[in-house]
Image: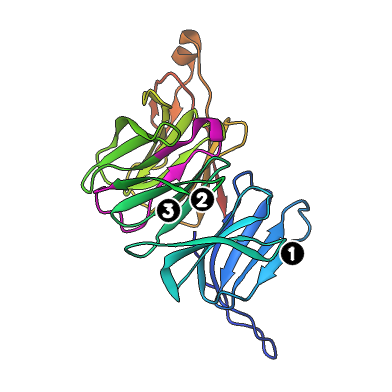
Amino acid sequence: MEAEAADAPPGRVEAALSCFSFNQDCTSLAIGTKAGYKLFSLSSVEQLDQVHGSNEIPDVYIVERLFSSSLVVVVSHTKPRQMNVYHFKKGTEICNYSYSSNILSIRLNRQRLLVCLEESIYIHNIKDMKLLKTVLDIPSNPTGLCALSINHSNSYLAYPGSQSTGEIVLYDGNSLKTVCTIAAHEGTLAAITFNSSGSKLASASEKGTVIRVFSVPEGQKLYEFRRGMKRYVTISSLVFSMDSQFLCASSNTETVHIFKMEHLTDRQVRGQAEFLPDGRSSPRLFCVRSLELHF
């Protein structure tokens, strides 16, 4: 995710914020700026404790930390085709790789590191950073939309399979083979994410009205959540809670929707329904409860 920083207060020189991201288990926050990057611990809710900062690479637009380890991946606008991997506690560069076009996103777990370009995805082995596989000729993906399970035992990768529809390609990062293709939405994809165990995959289309959850690796639809009926929105982020009981969606409407995934018995289905924003109900095998947080 990216964000614009506010102007610096008088008398202070603050580097503009260009990107920020949580690590895989949300225990650390990484931010990229015009001057470099910084890593913060999230052990306290009262303050952010900086654990590392570097100004060696300016104009950072991608910075990803591997869980709470010392491995950090950085990409700069000065060299947008180059990925730099560092061991920040030792102050050493582990490696750097250059690619044929600009790097759009980076995803990693304890088994794999993914580099997403507009028309290809590179899969590296996290232990020695060797290139294992290049997924070529993917449909044009100008935003670098892709997801990687944080569970290294289930290193599934998901990416758009079409430019015109919401098709998802599910790929096994361990066996390096395509698992299945999921017809998730009629419109093109806007967001995809795995739960912590890699057993579920959530997706949203560019319309932002419907969010669906699928089983992994089968690709069967488990849940369908109605975020809205009439107004189209741009969903920028989807994330599961660590226990996979809740799914959070944020969009450009300055609201956050939180859905609870709850299967119902046949008897409960007759007495309960999916709650839709306009007050209508639609019986389903699950109950959707949404919470809007206004900022």
* Mark 1 secondary-structure assignment: strand
N-terminal label among 3 and 2:
3
Q: What amino acid is at disc 2?
A: Met
Label 3 vs label 1, nearer the camera: 3
Cα separation between marks 3 and 2: 12 Å
Q: Compared with residue 93, is residue 159 higher up or lower down, i.e. above or below? A: above
Position of the C terminus, as image quadrant, is bottom right
Task: Single out the residue that lies furthest toward the top.
Answer: 267
Q: Along the horizontal axis of the image, is 216 left or right of 36?
A: left
* Mark 3 secondary-structure assignment: strand
Cα separation between marks 2 and 1: 27 Å
Residue 173 position, x and y percent, is 43, 37
Q: Along the horizontal axis of the image, is 177 left or right of 290?
A: left
Q: Compared with residue 34, is residue 106 higher up or lower down, i.e. above or below? A: above
| Residue positioned 31% across, 58% down in the render | 142
Q: Which residue is mark 2?
A: 129
Q: What amino acid is at disc 1?
A: Gln
Q: Residues within 10 Å of mark 3 (few under 14, many from 20)?
A: many
Q: Which residue is mark 3?
A: 115
User: What segment is highlighted magenta in the picture?
Assistant: 136-157
Task: Single out the residue that lies furthest toward the bottom.
Answer: 11
* Mark 2 secondary-structure assignment: loop
Q: In this view of the protein, which residue sits in the foreground, 140 or 193? A: 140
Q: Which mark is residue 28?
A: none
Q: Are marks 3 and 1 in contact (CB under 8 Å)?
A: no
Q: Which residue is mark 1?
A: 50
Residue 139 counted in the magenta span: yes
Label 3 vs label 2, nearer the camera: 2
Q: What amino acid is at disc 3?
A: Val
- Whether residue 295 can be seen here: no
Q: Residues within 10 Å of mark 1 (few under 14, many from 20)?
A: some
